[in-house]
Amino acid sequence: MIYEIALLPVHKEQVEQFKQAFAEVVHLLQRAKGYGGHMLAPGIESPERFNLIVRWASLEDHTPGFEASDDHQTFMLGLEKYFSEEPTVYHIEGAPFTTGKDEDQNGIFGVAVP
């Protein structure tokens, strides 16, 4: 499992319109092969900067998979006019959250803690 993290800068005066546009195209993302859920959230300090986090079964499901599809093209066409600059997209390996309590077996990066 991997996570796609997309930082979406939206024109301040178009935040509400962007939310509506996202709601209209999100079904295209949700029906993609390997899609495992998503979260779209505005920044607290910068509410016009949205964070889209998508869980994918594999990197290949996102890219080239969804990114090379007609659904992705339509998805982006529905959103791109709201962007104040080019979005930033990157991927991370999926990993469980740790609480730092004794029952956690591993520390950061899966390295055993004595």
Image (tube, rainbow, N blue to C red):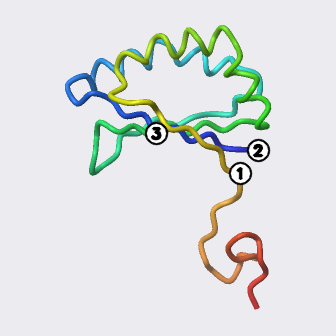
Badge 2 element: loop
- Say which residue appears at 37% left-offset and 30% top-offset: 85
Q: Residue at 29%, 36% (x, y): give it.
A: 48
User: Which residue is located at x 46 percent, y 33 percent?
Assistant: 87
Mark toward the start of the polypeptide (2 vs 1): 2
Residue at the far front in the pictured view: 86
Query: Where in the figure is residue 43, as x and y percent of width and height?
Result: 34, 45
- What amino acid does circle 2 point to? Met
How far across and down, in percent of the image, does residue 62 sit? 71, 29
Q: Secondary structure at mark 3?
A: strand
Mark 3 packing: few (<14 Cα in 10 Å), some, or many (20+)? many
Earlier-in-chain disc, 3 versus 2: 2
Badge 2: residue crowd in 10 Å (few <14, some 14–19, many ≥20): few
Residue holding disc 2: 1
The answer to whether the residues at label 3 and label 1 have Cβ atoms under 8 Å apart is no
Q: Position of residue 58 (x, y in %)?
A: 79, 37
Q: Residue at x 56, y 38 (%)?
A: 89
34 up-or-down from 95: above or below:
above
Would you name the residue on which mark 3 appears?
7
Residue marked by disc 1: 94
x then y, percent, for residue 113: 74, 85
